Amino acid sequence: MDHGAPIWNDAFGISWLDFNLSNVLMMFIASLIVFIIGVAATRNMQRKPTGYQNFIEWLIDFVKGIIGSNMDWRTGKRFLPLGLTLFTYIFVANMLGVILMVVVGNDLWWKSPTSDAGITLTLATMVVVLSHYYGIKLNGVKEYGKQFVRPLPFLLPFKIIEEFANTLTLGLRLYGNIFAGEVLLTMLAATAVSGFGGFFGAAIPMLAWQGFSTFIGFIQAFIFTMLTMVYLSHKVSTDH
């Protein structure tokens, strides 16, 4: 992809602070869409759900299933809002770059925010830090610390390395899949606008890849949410 990113260098006069304005814009748009979905889901709720309410209740049950497969519901119910937010936000973010990509002045403005490693690694770091927080909150510092020396104390360095590895793999897996999809979509789009023959040659593969990218976007949102609950269960459950 031979385009750049709209960078705000030395933001607020701070020499080491730079912002990728495209990331800021797309994170805001993804957050706004998720907020609208949440508000719409809680309006005009009925005892006998239909249409949109049916979909939202299915989504809630789907996330409850993810949580229930990793920990008992008594412990896991507190993580339902987190799971719903993560799954919805990541799926919406994944889809933004599938719908279209907008380049202005050789700068890419509209894309999937999850195609940036900085964003996905930040999400992963937040998840891992949150798992440690709940591990201490629910089990206490002493019981939490014992998890790093079970079943044998010499495993402590490996347990610490595992935490960093979990963060990297969680973030880079999401980034790699979404970024690769956008690269191919960009190549197909460039072929489509190259001429009459290029349009017909790339139209069908592009539509097929957009459909496949939608599937990948769903799977990656599912995997990220699932692994989040796995990491949380390892910290909050005493039987791990």
Image (cartoon, rainbow, N blue to C red):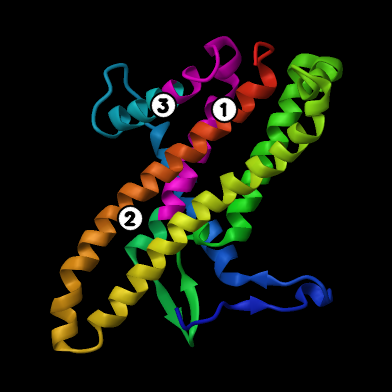
| Point 65% across, 11% down: residue | 239
Which image quarter holds the C terminus?
top right
Q: Which mark is residue 60?
A: 3
Residue 223, x across and y down, in percent: 46, 38
Q: Which mark is residue 213?
A: 2
Badge 2 amino acid: Ser
Pointer 1: what residue? 230
Mark-to-mark CA distance, 3 and 2: 23 Å
Q: Is residue 29 visible?
A: no
- Please tell me which of labels 2 and 1 falls first in the chain: 2
**Furthest residue toward right:** 142
Badge 1 amino acid: Val
Mark-to-mark CA distance, 2 and 1: 25 Å
What's the magenta region? 65-94
Q: Is residue 191 above or below residue 64?
A: below
| Point 38% across, 42% down: residue | 219
Quick check: 120 left or right of 184? right
| Point 83% across, 77% down: residue | 13
Number of callouts: 3
SS state under label 1: helix
- Please tell me which of labels 3 and 2 falls first in the chain: 3
